[in-house]
Image (cartoon, rainbow, N blue to C red):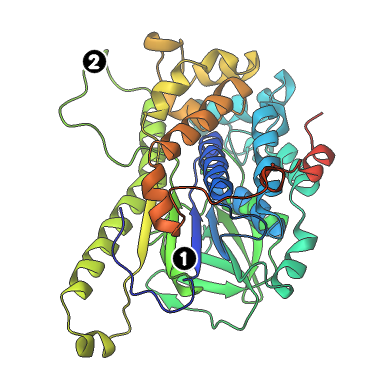
């Protein structure tokens, strides 16, 4: 989807928005790999095509990785592909029998007989799963110490990470910028300029109920934060506030269902897993679809105004390209539920996740937790094929020629991401 942008004499500032979705975020890496390939095909090498990057939930982790390596976009993408192709569940959350019993089994027990044991505070787990391994991986993987240098050198203009405060109920965008941009405030959502840390990434990606909340400082006061997709009514807004004039949005869920009713078999009351999966899908997808439609309406309205009328409003047309999965990721996850470690499968069975393939149940919930190569590699391949299928649209969006210019082939070769070797999964 795109609308016409009144382009100035110089190339417009391009923003990138990466949304949330746990393991589903591997899809974003496939899209980025295809964009990098099309960029090289057009003879565009070096530098960074996205000076403004905004990420939420697992998308915040991908966004930060790109921002910290913005002096070499190809190498950053190569590194993301390497990590997501080799990631395993136990690098994200405790997946052994002891870890699952310590958190997940106790959580499910509290849900069922908590009234009988609530007086023992030690029996109250904070989440279904313990994501301490993710914190350790991020400290090796995301080179946040490079971000300030990338901003000072002009490779980046701004990075924004969003989180949702359980303490105050506000949606907060934390941002780090090259130039002085005043914080903004809207109904139930605010922005704060800060130095992005691993704690911000853990907070933004703390899927409700599944991963524990993270404590962050907000205006000098500590608050508990969870997944940034919660209460995120305007996912595109941070990139616009930070100066993006055209925006690529990469979703992690299907934006539009095919017409007609899905042929599904009703087998009784929905399980906890089915209800949780449905709720998470609403959190991660619905706000994005609504915000894209809102931007389309604004662009359409601005297009019929006279130049004088447009000059009297602060609104401006923003060109937006949205790339989202062409397949239902729930169905794709159903084919790989068996890849989860046995203790995790056993715990999820208690919530109603079972089976594999067409006989699978609760696969929507499982799709957020399937940090295994069998699933993530399929998502990467899907992201690449979806993007290459829209080659002409992507080329028009960036202004790249359909026919690659003459160039030395050796200059277009992909560079190996050395930092990925340092952060490679053990």
- Residue farthest to the front? 406
Nearer to us in this view, 293 or 221: 293
> Quadrant of residue 149 in the image?
bottom right
Instruction: Relative to 213, say whether 328 is above or below.
Output: above
Residue 211 sits above or below residue 407 on the image: above
Per the model, the C-alpha gap separating discs 1 and 2 is 38 Å
- Give the image location of residue 150, x and y in percent: 72, 67
Residue under the point 53% across and 62% down: 167
The 10 Å Cα crowd at callout 1, few under 14, some 14 to 19, many 20 or more, is: some
Residue 390: horizontal and vertical position, in percent? 38, 41
In this picture, residue 348 sits left or right of residue 279 = right
Q: Identify the mark at residue 254; answer none if there is no mark.
A: none
Q: Are marks 1 and 2 in contact (CB under 8 Å)?
A: no
| Disc 2, SS | loop
Relative to 203, residue 175 above or below: below
- Residue 293 pos. (x, y %): 26, 57
Residue found at x 46% / y 52% = 229
Can residue 72 be spotted in the picture?
A: yes
Residue at 38% from the left image edge and 39% from the top image edge: 281
Specify the quadrant of the image occupied by residue 174: bottom right
In the figure, 269 relative to 173: above or below?
above
Position of residue 398 measured from the top left corner of the image (x, y, whole percent): 45, 58
Q: Is residue 370 visible?
A: no
The residue carrying mark 1 is 170
How many numbered marks does the figure carry?
Answer: 2
Q: Rate crowding at label 2 as few (under 14), some (14 to 19) or many (20 or more) other CA atoms within 10 Å.
A: few
| Residue indicated by mark 2 | 266
Report whether 185 appears left or right of 135.
left
- Viewer-closest of 107 and 248: 248
Identify the element where label 1 is drawn: loop
Question: Which label's residue is closer to the chain start, 1 or 2?
Answer: 1
Q: Residue at x 20, y 67 (%)?
A: 300
């Amino acid at each position: 989807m795109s609308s016409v942008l009144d382009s100035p004499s110089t190339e417009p500032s391009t923003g990138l928005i990466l949304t949330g979705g746990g393991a589903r975020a591997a899809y974003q890496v496939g899209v980025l790999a295809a964009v990098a390939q099309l960029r090289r095909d057009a003879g565009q090498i070096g530098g960074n095509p996205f000076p403004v990057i905004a990420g939420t939930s697992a998308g915040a982790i991908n966004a930060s990785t790109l921002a910290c390596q913005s002096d070499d976009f190809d190498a950053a993408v190569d590194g993301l592909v390497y990590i997501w192709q080799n990631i395993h569940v136990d690098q994200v959350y405790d997946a052994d029998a002891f870890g699952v019993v310590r958190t997940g089994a106790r959580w499910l027990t509290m849900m069922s007989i908590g009234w009988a044991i609530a007086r023992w505070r030690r029996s109250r787990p904070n989440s279904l799963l313990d994501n301490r391994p993710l914190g350790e991986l991020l400290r090796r993987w995301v080179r946040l110490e490079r971000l300030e240098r990338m901003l000072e050198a002009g490779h980046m203009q701004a990075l924004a990470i969003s989180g949702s405060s359980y303490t105050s109920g506000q949606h907060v965008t934390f941002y780090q910028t090259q130039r002085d941009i005043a914080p903004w405030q809207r109904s139930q959502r605010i922005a704060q300029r800060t130095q992005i840390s691993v704690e911000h990434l853990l907070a933004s990606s703390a899927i409700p109920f599944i991963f524990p909340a993270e404590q962050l400082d907000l205006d000098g006061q500590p608050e508990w934060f969870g997944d940034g997709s919660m209460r995120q009514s305007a996912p595109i807004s941070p990139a616009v506030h930070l100066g993006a004039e055209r925006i690529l949005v990469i979703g992690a869920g299907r934006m539009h269902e095919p017409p007609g009713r899905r042929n599904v078999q009703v087998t009784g009351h929905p399980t906890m897993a089915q209800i949780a999966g449905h709720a998470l899908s609403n959190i991660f997808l619905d706000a994005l679809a609504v915000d894209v439609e809102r931007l389309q309406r604004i662009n359409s309205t601005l297009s019929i105004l006279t130049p004088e009328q447009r000059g009297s409003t602060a609104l401006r047309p923003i060109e937006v390209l949205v790339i989202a999965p062409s397949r239902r990721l729930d169905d794709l996850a159903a084919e790989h539920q068996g890849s989860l470690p046995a203790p995790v499968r056993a715990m999820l069975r208690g919530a109603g996740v079972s089976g594999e393939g067409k006989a699978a149940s609760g696969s929507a919930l499982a799709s957020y937790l399937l940090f295994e190569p069998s699933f993530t590699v399929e998502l990467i391949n899907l992201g690449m094929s979806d993007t290459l299928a829209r080659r002409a649209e992507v080329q028009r969006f960036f202004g790249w020629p359909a026919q690659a210019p003459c160039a030395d082939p050796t200059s277009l070769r992909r560079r190996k991401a050395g930092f990925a070797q340092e952060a490679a999964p053990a």
